[in-house]
Image: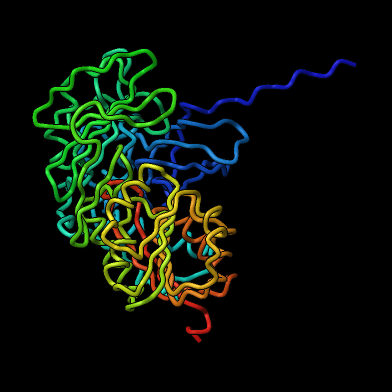
Amino acid sequence: MQAEPTKSPVSLVGEEYEVEVGPVAHGGHCIARTSEGQVLFVRHALPGERVVARVTEGEEGARFLRADAVRILEPSKDRIEAPCPFAGPGRCGGCDWQHAKPGAQRRLKADVIAEQLLRLAGLTPEEAGWDGTVVPAEGDKLPAGQVPQWRTRVQYAVDAATGKAGLRRHRSHEVEPIDHCMIAAAGVSELGIEKRDWAGMESVEAIAATGSQDRQVVLTPRPGARLPLVQLDRPVSVLRVDEKSGGVHRVHGRPFVRERADGRTYRVGGGGFWQVHPKAADTLVTAVMQGLLPRKGEMALDLYCGVGLFAGALADRLGEQGAVLGIESGKRAVEDARHNLADFPRVRIEQGKVESVLPRTGITEVDLVVLDPPRAGAGRKTVAHLSTLGARRIAYVACDPAALARDLGYFREGGYRVRTLRAFDLFPMTHHVECVAILEPAEKGR
């Protein structure tokens, strides 16, 4: 007997549902349910609203659907008209909360942190030593309708057909053409990236350093394309990304920018990582040092150390008898870190993945640890290793509350408790939030 052909799932894209919007969820959307009980992750909505949600991804029988709120039937008191003309359903995907008052955005982020802590680490805000607030960066507490210009690094996508720079639409490779990004720092906007033709380029990254006048453009060409002659509104260095190796090479100008934090200047080369908000580096260094309280002569680890921001702050406070080991996987970042910290003879930077390098160091005991892992977190193996080193305090800097909560759970298994947690709104208008957790051995908390 011939088997019946398998039926393809029925797409629900374009279907509309009138729904009551429930709580915020991690990722810049809220949760709702269709009348049939299917879960909707709805963007451009706020908790408590009644909206018409149009499905953007999903099919019958799927665990959940993604949707946009295309009509607001009963608005929240926290809703405002989005200041950005490029925000909204089907438009630029860079910002999640343009339609929410600034204070409401921070409350939404706090709700996400609290939910992730409880669900993944079994911690209430009180147990995490957190007051439940997300603190705006200095100068960012603006009235509703005003947008802080904070983004010092903007990755523009280039429309292949027109050569114009824009920003990606949410969960899409399509380019939303723009003439100005409202959250871009003034130093980025003054480069005028949106005004010129970038034909042949895949993307254009604009960088405006904090604490110096350095400006940089990093070009990623499409296969076989020639680089354009870059003549912008002010002096700028130009780098290109090699299409085969992914390496970054200098075209003209300095191959690095100079960033400033904690009273020191840091060289950041090849479009490498630096905190995007102009106040972020100083804010995070202050939070980490206040939590760790370094003492002269102590030994510290700085994991995922980048160009040496926290290693430099630690070395400065630990004195001549103290020592810092930094571990970083990026080759160029390691070169920069060694350059930036060359005046500290008892700072050593090793290249490689933390989970591979740390066991090979032979270190069995440290006083302090700072870790600032990528969005995925440090993971069970690395946390388990750190828990054996006897550190009196550990500072965990996290850009993702879910990864933070998972790793805090692993630290608890290893005998550490959260002493304090602080949250900072260093990514206004987006769902992203930065946290600093300070941990100590659990027996100290008894």
Residue at x 18%, y 27% (from the top left corner): 193
Residue at left offset 50%, top offset 56%:
378
Judged from this view, the residue extending furthest toward the bottom is 446
Which residue sits at x=46%, y=36%?
A: 17
**From the viewer's perspective, is residue 241 above or below residue 428?**
above
Horizontal arrangement in the rendering, residue 151 relative to residue 338 (left or right): left
Give the farthest residue toward the right.
1
Position of the N terminus, as image quadrant, is top right
- Using the rendered image of the protein, determine whether residue 225 is visible from the camera's viewpoint: yes
Question: Is 117 left or right of 95, judged from the image as shown?
Answer: right
Q: In x, y percent, where is residue 171?
A: 42, 33
Position of residue 241 measured from the top left corner of the image (x, y, whole percent): 34, 27
Expressed as whole percent of the image width and height from the top left, the position of residue 161 reads 31, 12
Is 321 drawn above or below residue 233 in the view shown? Answer: below
Q: Nearer the viewer, residue 256 or 76?
A: 256
- The location of residue 383, given as percent across then percent down, is 54, 63
- Relative horizontal placement of residue 39, taking residue 196 as reference (left or right): right
